[in-house]
Image (cartoon, coloured by chain):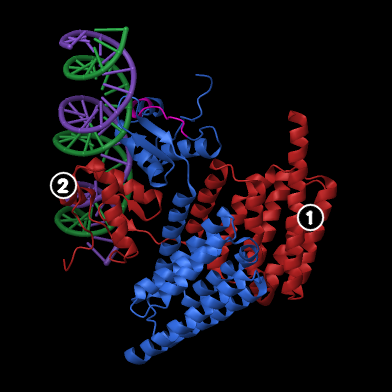
Chain colours: A red, B blue, C green, D purple
Amino acid sequence: MTHDPVKYDIDPDRDLSSQIAAAIRDAIITGDLIVDDRLPSESDLAERFRVSRPTVREALKRLAAQSLIRTQRGATGGAFVNRLSYEEAHRQQITTSTLLLSMNAIRFDTACEARYALERACTPLSAARRSAEHLAAMRAEIFRQSQPDLNDTGFCASDVAFHRALVDGAGNPVLSYQLAGAVEAMQPLMNMITFTARSREEIVSLHRRIADAIEARDSAAAEAALTDLEAYTQGLARNVMAERAQKHG
Amino acid sequence: MTHDPVKYDIDPDRDLSSQIAAAIRDAIITGDLIVDDRLPSESDLAERFRVSRPTVREALKRLAAQSLIRTQRGATGGAFVNRLSYEEAHRQQITTSTLLLSMNAIRFDTACEARYALERACTPLSAARRSAEHLAAMRAEIFRQSQPDLNDTGFCASDVAFHRALVDGAGNPVLSYQLAGAVEAMQPLMNMITFTARSREEIVSLHRRIADAIEARDSAAAEAALTDLEAYTQGLARNVMAERAQKHG
DNA sequence: AAACATTTATTTGTATGACAATTGAAGCAC
DNA sequence: GTGCTTCAATTGTCATACAAATAAATGTTT
């Protein structure tokens, strides 16, 4: 062994598994442990940290919860540093954002404003770079949304897919991961708005304006349509709120 | 007990602690368990899931790693559902983004483009709403950055703080949490660039342009300055790359 | 009666030892 | 050489025990 990448000195008076997890996480973040590196076995780690195996296991489960490691049983098994994929990062981003929104009584207009601001951020790139496939995906979702027999959940899902295609059109995976998380985290809030036939029609028409603008590579028009869509969505939400207030008051 | 919020049926052939964590996490996400609710004690959970206490503990540590619960020892202690704060969500966002960037060989220009696109997204809001405090924070960082005895790490940190103030000026915490994560995750990449006196001067001057525009509530000017800053940063990075290629080739 | 000290019950934190399940590698027979 | 068996390493799980913290209950003193 040239040099052990993990620091094994911990304070025995403070939470052990948390410190052990932090020590290993540090080694991963600093790059001392790289993707697919194998950690020492649980018994080894227990000896080196001078703790019991269950304590080491608790630490490893913490890391597994963040997808920093994966484990494999058997002779050549063990815990390996995991590559954090876009999909996984995206998934984590969604759960974090969803919980943040649901636990902190975030106002709908705050979340909505953030969402559309972020989305407008990638419109110039999407207008410039979108492929025919992205455009086709947007058109397909518009078609789905215009079917009268689609239920509200399906309509919202299609809405998410439409905006996902718009974001992906920018061809920047970092941007996609950030934005798609924000958009999808808003879906539960959006589901609370019941869509009348009239409002669906309006939304689909705005989606069509966006798709047309992206097709024409007209970034300004797309941004304007998004702004209108935001205003319309906010108006819908205000109506729902007002109706509820009347019912309960 | 009216109705237990947790589903206790798990498949004994698949990873137990993972399933237990998922069952409790579901109860939290769906709102069946709300903030500050106390989970059953570890022994209780062990009985109900029909597993041993160490297995339950592994599951709880998974949830603790995501800050979904906190634990407290003692007579009235136990595991409690944690409120996911903006700070915590922000922290998670940074580690996730940092790991994503470092593990997937993301090109500097891709990350840089995403960062400035996102930042431009909140400029209109920041220009409209920034308080005197936000402006003062930006000016203070500009002053720090113009001190010649500041080292490169300090310069980068101040750069992050400047952009953080810009983002916070929008007065939308959801936006702040998303964007600040993206900006801070880029810092390790930025630290790889050594800043000459000349380049610092240029960056500070661009920061001053941004602050001036925000002060004047001129969103378009701020966006233009950000675009110029992006172009300048990309140029700096290209130079560093070229120099390295020459050294190693 | 009130203030203070003590005990006690509950709960998490940690350790020990054991066994099951999995899995690749080594050894062996053919 | 091929296929089978055995084996050793490793994670997954369990049972039990004890330590440490903590608040409530209890007792004691003033």
Q: Is residue B116 left or right of residue A120?
A: left
Q: Which residues are magenta?
A: B36-44
The secondary structure that most of the magenta stretch takes on is loop
Q: Secondary structure at mark 2?
A: loop
Residue A103: x and y, percent?
54, 41
The answer to whether residue B233 of the structure is visible from this angle is no
Front residue (pair B11, A104):
A104
Name the residue that disc number 1 marks.
A203
Marks 1/2: CA–CA distance: 61 Å
Query: Are dots 1 and 2 in contact, CB under 8 Å?
Result: no
Question: Disc 1 is attached to a residue of which chain?
Answer: A
Residue B223: x and y, percent?
62, 74
Mark 1 or 2 closer to N-term?
A: 2
The kind of residue on which mark 1 rests is: Ile
The answer to whether residue B195 of the structure is visible from this angle is yes
What quarter of the picture does the C terminus of chain A occupy? top right
Q: Secondary structure at mark 1?
A: helix
Name the residue that disc number 2 marks.
A50
